[in-house]
Image (spheres, grey):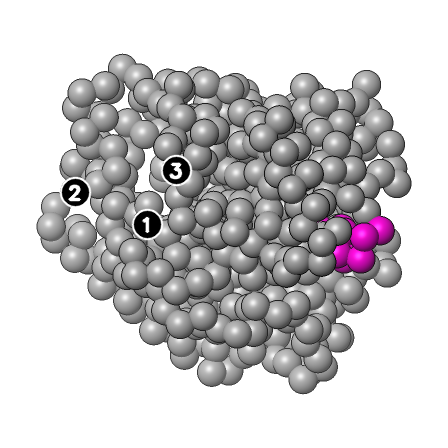
């Protein structure tokens, strides 16, 4: 099964198509063939629009032959997370309430990808309304980890991560509140980039001024994610956080000179409960990469009160988005949505004020932290992927979880700060699923994060212990 067009990186596919050495039609058919073989086992790709995609691939091929100006994503098959509206293609948010919903238009981010030449092939699976990091919902069922189909793939961008890992699609969209880009990327051995708020504008946040939810790219490697990001970034007045476009994000990233950078490493960010297996694997990885940097220091940022702050702010967002459904259609909502809404209803104005004050203090402590360090690395997830039947782990390292999402603390701690963070694979952890590094950069330093991640990715590629692992595609298609 190896050596097919769909296995090539998105950047290489775009180069081959632009040079007329591969056809958008051939690339699309390779992806459709791979989906047919492995998706029945994995359930990553849900609603599809193959005939429309074939028409668009033929049109893309004609533009290439004519020598027309081409978009940065010209001819590339794209998977769109099922939390993003797609014109003419079923969008369910993983909810029975919306199981037959077919939008009349693309939302802005999807439209931007289409305008850049991407060909939407289908939707990728999510938890109900993106709540929780186990990609399982009443409409489509569970998505499985390509390295061990008995385990979860993470979420909420789980379908996107699995579609990438199994080379069903070369690029996929994602979004992230408490780790929804970074967690499935970590579990599936691909790249998920949580950008700074406003970098990829969205009109979908009900509370537009909060910074915890962002949209962003996923790819099999850093350059592929950066390629998709270059089409997603723009200035859009519908998003209060949108700002001027950083021209560095419109160009391919250049590897950073790691020998000039001061690295800070933290296994738990000073507050998270971390599984000993992840902690040990992370210490091993830092030991292997520390010498590449100018200096490496083990140091935890000050994140006191992060759990409480995130719980409150997150609940307020769920109140804004789901209170009406809770009151009118509670019987159609899953336990995660109900828990979030009820948590928000129980909070007072004093709770909300305290949470935002703590978030502000944590942000300012991060600003101080990055005066002494150029980049921070930590794990993105506290545990290895667990059994698919479990919604969440009730305890980590023998300690009970505060909420169903408490085990995502290493990701949501960084969410609170608004700093850009990317998850990149680095070999396998002790259970045989992918290990990862979460690379966090300074405020607004999205281009720097990509640059450092690319340098790490290239340096790790030659080490069999650190290189990106690949799932057994032959076994998945059996």
Which residue carries the number 1 mark? 203
Q: In the figure, residue 206 lies in which quadrant?
A: top left
Residue 343, percent from left and from top: 23, 36
Judging depth in this view, the residue of 12 and 191 nearest the camera is 12
CB of mark 3 within 8 Å of CB of mark 2?
no
Viewer-side label of 3, 2: 3
At numbered mark 1, what does the secondary structure look like: helix, strand or loop? loop
Q: Give the residue at the far left of this rendering.
A: 349
Q: CA distance from mark 2 to mark 1?
A: 26 Å
Picture coordinates of residue 109, whole percent (x, y): 44, 50
CA neighbours of label 3 inside 10 A, class few (<14), some (14 to 19), many (20+): few
Camera-near label (3 vs 1) is: 3
| 294 horizontally vs 314: left or right | right
Give the residue number, with chain letter if any, for mark 3.
105
According to the picture, the residue beneath numbered tag 2 turns out to be 347
Q: Between residue 68 and residue 412, name the one nearer to us.
A: 68
**What residue is drawn where x is 53% and y is 47%?**
114
Q: Quadrant of residue 400?
A: top left
Residue 182 image point, x, y percent: 54, 49
Which range is magenta?
10-21
Within the image, what quadrant is residue 461 found in? Answer: bottom right
Q: Nearer the viewer, mark 2 or mark 1?
A: 1
- Give the crowd class for mark 1: few <14, some 14-19, many >=20 residues within 10 Å: some
In the foreground, 150 or 166: 166
Residue in view at x 68 percent, y 19 percent: 40
Q: State which quarter of the image contains the C terminus.
A: top right
């Amino acid at each position: 099964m190896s050596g097919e067009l769909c296995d090539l990186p998105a950047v290489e596919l775009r180069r081959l198509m632009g040079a007329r050495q591969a056809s958008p039609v051939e690339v699309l058919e390779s992806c459709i063939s791979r989906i047919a073989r492995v998706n029945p086992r994995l359930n990553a790709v849900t609603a599809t629009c193959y005939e429309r995609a074939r028409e668009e691939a033929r049109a893309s091929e004609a533009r290439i032959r004519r020598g027309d100006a081409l978009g940065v994503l010209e001819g590339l098959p794209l998977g769109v997370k099922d939390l993003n509206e797609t014109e003419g293609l079923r969008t369910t948010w993983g909810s029975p309430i919306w199981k037959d919903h077919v939008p009349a238009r693309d939302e802005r981010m999807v439209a931007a990808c289409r305008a850049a030449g991407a060909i939407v092939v289908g939707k990728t699976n999510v938890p109900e309304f993106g709540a929780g990091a186990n990609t399982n919902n009443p409409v489509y069922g569970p998505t499985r980890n390509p390295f061990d189909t008995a385990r979860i793939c993470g979420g909420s961008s789980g379908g996107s991560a699995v579609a990438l890992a199994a080379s069903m699609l070369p690029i996929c969209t994602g979004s992230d509140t408490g780790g929804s880009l970074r967690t499935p990327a970590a579990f599936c051995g691909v790249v998920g980039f949580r950008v700074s708020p406003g970098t990829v504008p969205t009109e979908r946040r009900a509370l537009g001024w909060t910074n915890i939810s962002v949209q962003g790219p996923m790819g099999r490697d850093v350059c592929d994610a950066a390629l998709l990001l270059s089409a997603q970034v723009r200035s859009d007045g519908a998003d209060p956080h949108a700002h001027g476009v950083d021209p560095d994000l419109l160009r391919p990233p250049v590897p950073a000179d790691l020998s000039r950078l001061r690295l800070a490493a933290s296994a738990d960010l000073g507050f998270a409960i971390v599984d000993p297996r992840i902690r040990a694997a992370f210490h091993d990885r830092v030991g292997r990469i520390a010498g590449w940097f100018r200096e490496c220091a083990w140091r935890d940022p000050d994140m006191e009160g992060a759990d409480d702050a995130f719980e409150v702010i997150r609940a307020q967002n769920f109140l804004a988005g789901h209170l009406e459904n809770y009151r009118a259609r509670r019987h159609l909502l899953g336990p995660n949505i109900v828990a979030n809404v009820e948590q928000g209803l129980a909070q007072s104005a004093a709770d909300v004020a305290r949470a935002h004050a703590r978030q502000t203090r944590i942000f300012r402590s991060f600003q101080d932290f990055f005066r002494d360090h150029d980049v921070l690395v930590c794990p993105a997830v506290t545990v290895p992927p667990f059994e698919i039947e479990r919604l969440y782990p009730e305890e980590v390292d023998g300690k009970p979880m505060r909420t169903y999402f408490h085990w995502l603390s290493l990701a949501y701690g960084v969410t609170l700060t608004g700093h850009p963070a990317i998850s990149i694979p680095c070999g396998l952890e002790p259970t045989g699923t992918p290990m990862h590094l979460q690379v966090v950069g300074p405020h607004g330093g999205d281009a720097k994060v990509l640059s450092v991640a690319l340098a790490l990715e290239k340096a790790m590629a030659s080490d069999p212990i650190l290189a990106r692992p690949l799932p057994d595609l032959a076994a998945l298609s059996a």
